[in-house]
Image (tube, grey):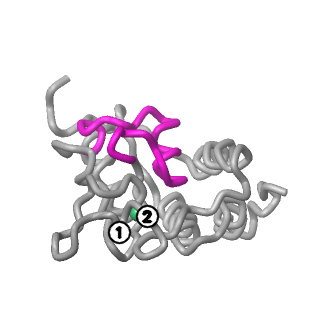
Amino acid sequence: MTTDKLPKDKITYVELAEVINDIKNIVIQKPDYVYPKGGPDCDMCFDFPLGQDFDLEDCGLHTSEEGGCRYFDNSNHSVCLIGTYFESKGWTTPDMFGVDEMWEIEDENVDEVLDKIQASTGFSFGIEVRDFLTQTQSRQDTYNTWKDSFNNSLPIYLKDESVV
Ligand SMILES: [Zn+2]
């Protein structure tokens, strides 16, 4: 199929319960992982010549001197929790995101990246999924463990899903 607009029956609504299950399966493998700080705290970030603009090639973990977290490194391996989720779904190629190069998604928050996936595939994400992933990303990006990022982003009625 080469049409830009998919017919409604080809749209797959990604359910919150499924997303939570997928993220949980990743978190339980590295519950205490904290995403490394960037900028002055990262050797790779600050190992580029003074006066030169920061380039994504400089650091596989960060998007800027301020230390933004990356979804994928320069070898297209997932690095942040959300990137690892994308990888677990097989969403690792530019065509999934409607971009020419994978680095084009690096400066975007997860809500913006979900818009890209939604525009380029049959997957659709509702507000609950977006809220959950946005909160999880935000907590991870402010140096909470993956377990805390996940647990504290669960809606009240799904706290039973917490990783212990
Ligand atoms: Zn870095």
Q: Position of residue 10 (x, y in %)?
A: 35, 32
Ligand 1 rendered quadrant: bottom left
> For the residue labelled by badge 1, is the local secondary structure a helix, a strand or a loop?
loop
| Mark 2 CB near ligand 1 (8 Å cut) | yes
Q: Nearer the viewer, residue 131 or 127?
A: 131
Residue at the image position 69 percent from the left and 49 percent from the top: 30
Name above or below for residue 20 compared with residue 123: below
Q: Is residue 119 visible?
A: yes
Decide: few, some or many residues near mark 2? Use Cα within 10 Å; few <14, some 14-19, many ≥20: few
**Quick check: marks 1 and 2 in contact, CB under 8 Å?**
yes
Q: Nearer the viewer, residue 68 or 135?
A: 68
| Residue at which label 1 appears | 46
65 on left or right of 147? left
Across the whole image, how many numbered discs are drawn on residues? 2
Q: Nearer the viewer, residue 78 or 129?
A: 78
Residue at the image position 44 percent from the left and 32 percent from the top: 90
Label 1 vs label 2: CA separation? Answer: 5 Å
| Mark 1 CB near ligand 1 (8 Å cut) | yes
Residue at the image position 39 percent from the left and 60 percent from the top: 44
Residue 45 magenta: no
Residue 26 found in image quarter: top right
Q: Amino acid at mark 1?
A: Phe
Q: Position of residue 89 (x, y in %)?
A: 48, 35
| Residue at which label 2 appears | 43
49 on left or right of 111? left
Q: Which residues are magenta?
A: 73-97
